[in-house]
Amino acid sequence: MILHRTILVSSLIATATLVGCTAPQTTTRSNGGPMEPTTTLGHRDPIVRSQLREQALDRLVTASSSSVPQERANALEGLLEAPSRLAPIAAIALTDENEGVRAIAALVAGKANLRSLTSALRPLVRDSSPFVKASAIFALDALGEKVDPTPLGSLLFDAESTNVRSHAAFILGEMGDDAAMPMLADAARRRTPGSTVVEQKLLELQIAEAMVKLGDRRQLDSIRAALLPSSPDDLEATALAVQIIGSVNDRSSIDRLIFLSGYGFDGPKGPPMPAEVMLGVAGSLGKLGERGGSWVADKYMSHTDLLLRAQAASVYGNIGRQENLGKLGVLLEDQEPIVQVAAASAILDILGGGRR
């Protein structure tokens, strides 16, 4: 799911806190049986792969009409691999009651080049939600439509929320116009009134990522610096920095990520990194072409925490190895829909959606 890390999903739809890394705990399926870490799925059989792909697509289509906003939003992201399935669902989602879902719908409309949604996107540049407004500007620009980007500057500088400012920075990075570089640099120096130190740090990292996307690789230094937390308060920034490294294809940081996986707060012998960070490292390494991290996802695919199971599924997708399809087939039948959606999206990451 290429939009999995966007600010608006975490701020509007789901809330998750980084916790200490605990030992994996076994969970059970809805039928009461144990969640097995492997299955005999014949991933080399093209018929089996095709059937699994269809099951994943069906699960995402079903989730797109869930009563839970996070499931609807994540389903939209997962369907990016199948634009023809995505188009009618995104059209409905553009009018969703939840602003996070509307914003994700606009983002995927632009990412998937859904030109049929142009007329539905235009009113959203006046949406009451700044997240939706920014995403609609991105989508129309991506579709080659004339759109005024000025509101993005206002959101970047004047919004009272670091989440809104971060989303505006993310959008500017995605739009790819390096004329925004000076504006982003100025915004990085402007503190949001009332924000915490952690919130401000997350904003600075998001701005740094946008500037890297626009060509300023010097910003990688500040992103890399966040990889080594000195206290638990730094963990959110570390988790974000880990994901950014994978998103911007910073292969020179591969050794840093590997080191981080064995690093504790008091050095290599200190307490281990939280599960979320360990999974993030494995996922980013997978994006960077280092595909040996399946063992990390294996540790958490049966954890009692549904968010860790979902993240483990996403890691399998980042790694992209077809031999993990059996594990994803198990997670596709998890008792929690959020995990099912993550598994379905990962299956499409590995197999593609058939572009249908």
Image (cartoon, rainbow, N blue to C red):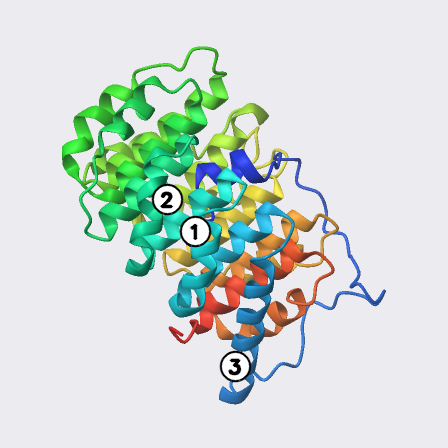
Identified by mark 2, the residue type is Ile
Tag of residue 49: 3
Identified by mark 3, the residue type is Arg
Please give the residue where the numbered disc 2 appears in the rendered image.
245
Residue at horizontal 49%, vertical 22%?
198
Tell me the distance, in whole angstroms, between the alpha carbons under discs 3 and 2.
31 Å
Q: From the viewer's perspective, is the residue at label 3 or at label 2 nearer?
A: 3
Q: Earlier in the sequence, mark 3 or mark 2?
A: 3
Instruction: Return the x and y of residue 338 as percentages of the image width and height.
Output: 63, 54
Residue count near mark 1 (Cα–Cα under 10 Å), binned few <14, some 14–19, many ≥20: many
Tell me the distance, in whole angstroms, between the alpha carbons under discs 3 and 1.
25 Å
Q: Is residue 297 left or right of residue 76?
A: right
Q: From the viewer's perspective, is the residue at label 3 or at label 1 nearer?
A: 3
Q: Is residue 307 left or right of residue 346?
A: right
Please give the residue where the numbered disc 1 appears in the rendered image.
284
User: Which is more toward the observer, 266 or 83?
Assistant: 83
In the rendered image of this protein, does residue 335 appear above or below residue 126? below
Instruction: Return the x and y of residue 302 as percentages of the image width and height.
Output: 71, 58
Q: Earlier in the sequence, mark 3 or mark 1?
A: 3
Q: Earlier in the sequence, mark 2 or mark 1?
A: 2
Residue at horizontal 28%, vertical 21%?
187
Q: Is residue 83 left or right of residue 292?
A: left
Q: Is residue 221 left or right of residue 271?
A: left
